[in-house]
Image (spheres, rainbow, N blue to C red):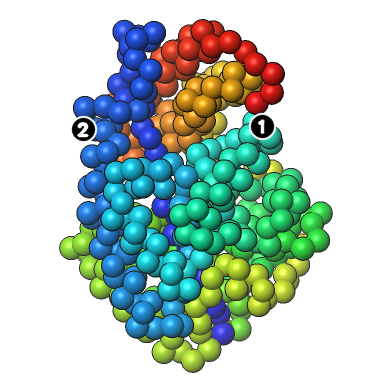
Amino acid sequence: MPAVCFYFQVHQPLRIKKYTIFNIGHDHDYFQSPDETANNIQILEKVSKTCYLPTNALLLKMLQANPDFKISFSLSGVFLEQIEDYQPEVLQSFQALVKTGQVEILSETYYHSLSYLYSKKEFKHQVQEHDKQVERLFGVKPAVFRNTELIYNNDLAQTIENMGFKGIITEGADHILGDRSPNFLYQPKNTKNIKLLLKNYRLSDDIGFRFSDPGWSGFPLTAHKFANWVHQINGNGEVVNLFMDYETFGEHQWEHTGIFQFLEHLPAAILEHGDNSFLTPSEVVAKFEARSELDIPDFISWADAERDLSAWRSNAMQIDAFEKLYALEDRIKATMDKVLIRDWRRLQTSDHFYYMCTKFFQDGDIHKYFSPYQSPYEAFMYFMNALKDLVLRLEMVPVRDGE
């Protein structure tokens, strides 16, 4: 009887342009670039055509045809900013999905940041800013939280519970589960009311990463084959959390792979088994009890083989960039300069630090795939140059009392 909980992460960063030492002190726009490899507007337009618009159109048709089909999205604030400004048709298509009543919008940090690791005050501000934007654009208030990159530990769960959320989502990492299954709800340690949903990363990655791999034993993946895998969980789980990047559809897995046909036929294939269903995260939290307490004292994430913070904090460049950025918090906020504060927050987006990662082998290849830069060192250089300019701007702004 497993319920399928589909959640899609939708995020497009404001990538830092090729910001050299010659830009410092003269050019205060760190993000808009005529260079096509880091041009955020061009990238957004491309992904809108390959993924957002066709997938949203398909999902709307599927939702209207089947009232039992349900999905959820986590839409970063910087993504929503960009589609509101440059791709209003994409925003309207997401709004049409939410209006069906079968789509839930989750909460996250507005700037898709790792702020919880450095400033709880900044973290709470970004969550509140994100939720206000969601309410303004969609008329709904998020009730389940998803932290950037599924980063999670016990303390975060307590913080999120105190902020009034009913559920929180993270990775079903093997090293924290042991012999337990990700296909149940759990109670975060030292909490009372909030419940923990864990990603079934094997089934999620079958779609997100392995779908078009001819060397994979499951290739070719059909809707009925996948539905049978879900059905095999009957008796050994209550919910299958399928969490993945939305760009899986049409961008990471191109249209010619058959990914859209797979998606279109999947709900009917899963619902052929009478005990199966689709639920949103809030519905999962309301329907199922937590099976046991889950103690996760150290941070985990959904990134790389280690499922930890090493994708963003594994080398001296990343650590130096983080520390210098967050060291500015009090001084930046004291200026009450909205543009300065906004730019400081845009530099917090996790992607900037992801591009600086120097891992090798498969994880390194994935980092290179997403990066618009020639190397991690180039990403670090442009980031630090932008940060130097931000400091110069800060020194020229009079400090006021309060934020």
Task: Decide if residue 286 is on the left or right side of residue 189.
Answer: left
Secondary structure at badge 2 equals: loop
How many numbered badges does the structure rendering display? 2
The quadrant where residue 128 appears: top right
The quadrant where residue 40 appears: top left
The answer to whether 258 is drawn above or below residue 152 in the figure is: below
**Is 352 in front, or is 110?**
110
The answer to whether 387 is drawn above or below residue 51 in the figure is: above
**Is 339 in front, or is 295?**
339
Q: Residue at x 22, y 47 (%)?
A: 46
Query: Pointer 1: residues within 10 angstroms few (<14), some, or many (20+)?
Result: some
Task: Decide if residue 91 is on the left or right side of residue 318.
Answer: left
The picture places residue 138, in percent across and down from the top left corner, at 47, 59
Q: Amino acid at mark 1?
A: Ser
The picture places residue 266, in percent across and down from the top left corner, at 36, 77
**Is 325 in front, or is 300?**
325
Tell which residue pokes out farthest to the bottom in this image.
274
N-term mark: 2 or 1: 2
Residue 364 appears in the picture as rendered: no
Q: Residue at x 46, y 83 (%)?
A: 68
Q: Quadrant of the C terminus?
A: top right
Q: Residue at x 48, y 73 (%)?
A: 101
Tell which residue pokes out farthest to the left in this image.
256
Q: Amino acid at mark 2?
A: Glu
In the picture of the structure, the residue carrying the numbered disc 2 is 36
The picture places residue 270, in percent across and down from the top left corner, at 42, 82
Residue 54 appears in the picture as rendered: yes
In the picture of the structure, the residue carrying the numbered disc 1 is 119
The answer to whether 336 is drawn above or below residue 210 in the figure is: above
